[in-house]
Image: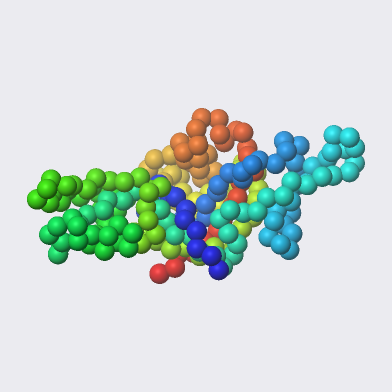
Amino acid sequence: MKDRPILFSAPMVRAILEGRKTQTRRVVKPQPSPSSDTAFVGTDGIWRFSHPTLRDPVSHEADDVRCPYGQPGDRLWVREKFQPLFADDIENHWETDWKTGKGYKISYPATDGIQEFIDLDDGLSDACKPSIHMPRWASRILLEITGVRVERLADISKDDAMAEGIVVQPDGGFGLADSTHYNFSDPTDSYCSLWESINGDGSWYANPWVWVVEFKRVT
């Protein structure tokens, strides 16, 4: 069993904490050949993308890719935007140790908002830090992988779109819990809007191969 970090935005963090998100999709890198049409997993945990060769369309070659997020049973610790604050019993900044977290308490803007800076006698203050810089000791969410597969992005089902954090809105439409990425009839269209907000215009219609990582929260 291995532990690996994974980044999530604030809305996705809230969805995980509220039990609404049990899947995440991440682009396979590098992407298989554009002619790849099928994918299967070997016993070694490596996915093989089968595609016709240029010399002989009847025979096939394979692009091998291993999931960088792990296999079922492995764990993911969530990196999110965070605000390191000095612990209440700390009077001097030299009493802290960033490597171990000693002397710090962590606030999480996704659920706590931005906290008032703590100003020590030397004028030192603590601003929010991006998720990529979160150390392991500051993470509050641990996930266990329950399944891994690959598929084309646009092949997502309505049920899987809901597992990505989309919820039914009061009027019967679909979107995130904060009503963003709203669509009145189809959760997959809501997820399309969410995907493009993260990955850029046109990224949905490129229809890349993606890792589908299913997980449960470890409490």
**Which x, y percent locates residue 70?**
58, 59
Could you say which is closer to the camera, residue 184 or residue 161?
Answer: 161
**Which x, y percent locates residue 45?**
68, 60
Residue at image point 60% right, 33% down: 205
Residue at image point 12% right, 51% down: 120
Could you say which is closer to the camera, residue 28 or residue 192?
Answer: 28
Horizontal side, residue 4 vs residue 32: left or right: left
**Which x, y percent locates residue 180?**
39, 40
Horizontal side, residue 44 vs residue 194: left or right: right
The quadrant where residue 101 appears = bottom left
Q: Residue furthest top?
A: 201
The quadrant where residue 78 appears = bottom left
Q: Residue furthest left?
A: 121
Does residue 91 lie above or below 8 as drawn?
Answer: below
Number of disc labels: 0
The quadrant where residue 181 appears = top left
Q: Is residue 78 at all visible to an observer of this figure? A: yes
Horizontal side, residue 32 vs residue 108: left or right: right
Colouring used for the render? rainbow
Residue at image point 53% right, 65% down: 2
Q: Is residue 169 at all visible to an observer of this figure? A: no
Quadrant where the N terminus sits is bottom right
Quadrant where the C terminus sits is bottom left
Residue at image point 62% right, 33% down: 206
**Which x, y percent locates residue 202?**
55, 30
